[in-house]
Amino acid sequence: HHRMFLEPQEKKRSMKAVVVKQAKKTCSCTPAKVKNYVFSFFPVLQWLPKYKLREYLLGDVMSGVIVGVLLVPQSIAYSLLAGQEPIYGLYTSFFASIIYFIFGTSRHISVGIFGVICLMVGQVVDREIQRAGYDLGPAALSVLTDTAAYVNTTISPVNQTSQKLLCDKSCYAITVGATMTFIAGVYQVAMGFFQVGFVSVYLSDSLLSGFVTGASFTIVTSQAKYLLGLDIPRSSGIGSLIATWINIFRNIHKTNICDLITSFLCFLVLIPTKELNEHFKSRLKAPIPVELVVIVAATLASHFGKLRETYGSSVAGHIPTGFLPPRPPDWNLIPNVALDAIPIAIIGFAITVSLSEMFAKKHGYSVKANQEMYAIGFCNIIPSFFHCFITSAALAKTLVKESTGCRTQMSGMVTSLVILLVLLVIAPLFYSLQKCVLAVITIVNLRGALRKFKDLPKMWHLSRVDTVIWLVTMAASAFISTEIGLLVGVCFSMLCVIFRTQRPEAPLLGWVAESETYESLSAYKNLQTKPGIVVFRFEAPLYYINKECFKSTLYKQTGVNPVWVKAAKKKAAKRMLREKEVDSGGNQTSISMDFVSEPLGFHTIVIDCCAVQFLDTAGIRTLKEVCKDYREIDVQVLLAQCNPSVRSSLIRGEFFKEGEDHLLFHSVHQAVDFA
C-alpha cells in the first residue's frame, strides 16, 4: 500500500479582513463605478445607443403592433378577472411595457397582465370589498350613500370616512388593487436589493406548472357565471371552486339564453382559429388577431341588436378616454393586503426571471436576475400611482412577440403606442361589448395550461416524483385556494427532497475485472468481490434525518449487526461460565466456545463516501459508533473517496485517533488494496 500525500491549501479566514474589504468595495466611489452602476440599473442606456435601425426596426414594429392588437382584448378581459373596470387593464398594460423598456434586461419577454396573478388579485379585491360593505343590498347602499352625502355637507371634506363612503365599488376595487400592487413591487425591489433571487429555486418547473394548471381551473370557474349570464356573488377563500359550482347549479334556471348563445358562438370561432394559428405558425408571418375580430363583431352585434335592452345581457359599460390623475395607494389598506402580496410577488418574479433566462439562453445573450427583479418591481411600484394592478411576464404573449420578429424591447414601446391609441380614441366604442365575450377570451387563453394533462404520461416516465409534485400542487391550488396551493406545493416538494435523502440507495459494490472501478452489484452482472472485504456505498448526505437508515442498511447489506453479535457473545460467555460452575468440561461448553468464535465471513468494510456531500454532528457520531461497534467484533471500517468538506468535518469531529488518519483513502481501490 502506497500512501498518497495531498497538502491542503491554507485558508486564512479573518472575518475582520473580509468585512473591511467588502466595506471598502461597497463604499468606494469613482466616476467609472458610478457610470457602471447607472448603466446596469438603466439597461436601456446600454443597448439603445447601439440600436441598429435598419436591421431591428421592422421586426420590432411588426411584433409590437401584433402584441398590442392581441393585448387590447386580453387587457379588457383580464380586468374582469381581477375584479376591475376594463380601463384599468389597459392602463396596466400601457405602463408595464414602458417601464420594462427602461429597466429590463431581456430583449424578448412581454410584461403585462397574467391570468393567474389577476385571479389572485381579484380574490383579495372581492374580500376587501365585502369587508368595506360594498356588497350590501341596494337599500342598505342607498342609506350608506345618503349618510355619506350628509356627512360630506356637515363635516370637513377631508374626513377619511366620508371620502371612503363616496368612493364607489369600482373606485374602491382599484384602490385595493393599486395598494397591493405597490406592496408587491416593494417586496420585489427588496428581493433584488438583498439579492434573494435564490427563493425562486424552490419553485421548480413541475411545481409552477401544476400551480398554473390548478389556478386555471379556478379561473374557468370564476368566468363560468359570465358565460351563463348569471348574477351570483364571487366565492373566495378555501374551497371557493366547489362553492362557486354549487352556486352556479343552484341558479342554472336563471341562465341568460342570449349570453349562452353568444358564448357558444365565440367558442366556435376562437378555438378553431387559435388551433390554426398554432398549427401554421411557421408559415404565418403573424398570427390571425381573432380575439380583436371577435370583440369588434360582438360589440357591433350587441350595439345594433340592443342585446342589453332586449335580453338583459351584461355589458362592459362606459370606458372613459384619456388618463385619470395619479393617486397614491391607500396606506391604511397596507396591513390588510401585505400578507396577500407576498405569494403574488414571488410568483411574479419567478415567472419573469425564468422566462427571461429561457429566451436569453435560446438567443445567446445574458440577463441579470437581480436587475429583472428590480424591473418587475418598478413595473408594479410606479404604475400603482396610476390606477394599475400587478403585472409579470406572460408566456403566450412572449412567444407571439418572439415569433413575429422582435429583436429588442423597442417592440414594447410600439405595443404601448397601440394601447395608447385605444385609450385616447377607441375605448368608449366598447360600451356594448358583452362580458360573456371577455370570459370566453380568458378561458380560451388557458388552453396551454389545461393541456398539461396530456404531458402527464411522459412526465411520469421521466420522473414520478415530479409528477406527484405537479398533481399535489395542481389539486391544492384548484380545490383549496391558490395561495395555500402554492404553499402546499413548496412544502411538498421540499418534503420529497428530504424523503429521497432519508431513504437513499445504498448498494454493495463489486470490482470490474482488469480495472480500478467499483460498481453496484445490484445494477451490473459479472462483478467480482474480494474475499473478506465488503464495499458499501451510501448515496446521500449523512445527517440527523437518515443516520438510522444508514446504520440499518449497512447492517442489512453486510448481514452482520455488531450489536447483536456482541450481545450473542456475551450471552454465550455467560452460559459457558454457568455450565463450568455446574459441570466442568463437556460438549455443551465446546459448542458455546465454537459459537463465540464463529467467523463472520469478512474482516473489513470499505465505505465509499463519494456520494456523501456533507456530514453533520449526528452523521459524524454515527460513523464513530459504527467503527467502534465493528472494531469490537474484529472488523475494521475504512472510508474512501471523501470530498474535502467531509474530510474537514471528520477531522474537526475528532473521528480519527492519533496516527489513524491514514485510514482515510482517496479511492475505493486503494482502500481495498490496503485491506
Image (cartoon, helix red, strand yellow):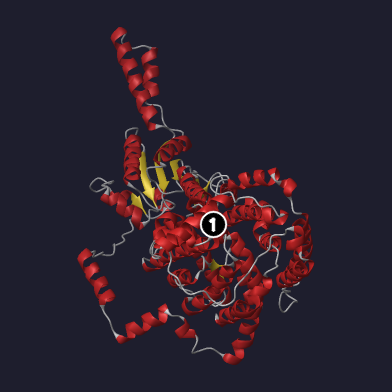
> Which quadrant: the C terminus?
top left
Residue at point 31%, 37% (across, down): 628
**Residue 318 visible somewhere in the drawing:** yes
Residue closer to the observer: 63 or 616? 63
Above or below, 258 against 529 in this view is below
Q: Residue furthest bottom?
A: 54
Q: Quadrant of residue 315?
A: bottom right
On screen, residue 575 versus residue 127, left or right, reads left
Q: Which amino acid type corresponds to the residue marked 1 in the rendered image?
A: Met
Task: Name which quarter of the figure residue 579 lies in.
Answer: top left
Q: Position of residue 485 (x, y in %)?
A: 53, 50
Up the image or down, 336 lies above or below 40; here it is above
* Quadrant assignment, res 74: bottom right
Please state the horizontal and vertical placement of residue 56, each as a whole percent of the image: 60, 87
Residue pictured at 41% horizontal, 45% vertical: 606
Under tag 1, what secondary structure? helix
150 lies above or below 89: above
Count the numbered circles shown: 1
* Nearer-the-camera pick, 216 or 23: 216
Q: Position of residue 418 (x, y in %)?
A: 62, 80
Asked whether residue 406 appears in the rendered view, the answer is no
Q: Position of residue 135 (x, y in %)?
A: 55, 52
Q: Is residue 3 left or right of residue 553?
A: left
Residue on which the image places disc 1: 120
